[in-house]
Image (cartoon, grey):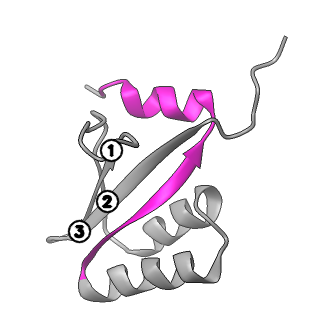
Amino acid sequence: MAPDPQPTHRVLMQFMDRNGWHVSFLEPDCKTALPVKLTFAAEEKIRDLHHRFGSPLLEDRQSLEHGLSIGRGSAWLKLNQEQYCRLKTPRP
């Protein structure tokens, strides 16, 4: 039986521009950090994550763009079980 591809987990993606875009993820309680942290050279990667896993609502896209314009922000993402497990597994 194949795993359910439907989104089952919400995580908060936080991002900040400090010599590259640093991205971290929080559990829905907004207190518990997930171990995987990412760094991107361009803000386009953050847009791509939001486009693939974030809300399509205009207000949410505008909020993302505002955060990118000021150099810091956050957005909710919906992930399936496999994607969520990747964020919970620390990378070497």
Frontmost of labels 3 and 1 is: 1
Q: Amino acid at mark 3?
A: Met
Mark 2 touches mark 3? (CB < 8 Å): yes
Q: Is residue 90 left or right of residue 28?
A: left
Return the residue at label 2: 14
* Image location of residue 34, percent across then percent down: 31, 35
- Residue 61's place in the image compared with 6, above or below, is below
Q: Is residue 55 left or right of residue 66?
A: right
Residue shown at the point (34%, 42%) measured from the top left: 29
Q: Is residue 48 left or right of residue 29?
A: right
Mark 3 touches mark 1? (CB < 8 Å): no
Q: Which mark is residue 26?
A: 1
* Image location of residue 10, percent across then percent down: 51, 44
Range of magenta residues: 71-90
Return the residue at label 3: 16
Residue shown at the point (50%, 33%) measured from the top left: 84
Observer-nearest of 76 and 37? 76
Q: Which mark is residue 69?
A: none
Q: Amino acid at mark 2?
A: Gln
Residue shown at the point (39%, 75%) measured from the top left: 43
* Image location of residue 32, percent across then percent down: 26, 36
Is residue 44 on the magenta stretch? no
- Residue 64's place in the image compared with 88, above or below, is below
Q: Earlier in the sequence, mark 3 or mark 1?
A: 3
Q: Amino acid at mark 1?
A: Leu
Inter-mark Cα distance, 2 to 3: 7 Å
Mark 2 touches mark 1? (CB < 8 Å): yes
Q: Secondary structure at mark 3?
A: strand
Q: Secondary structure at mark 1?
A: strand
Q: Secondary structure at mark 2?
A: strand
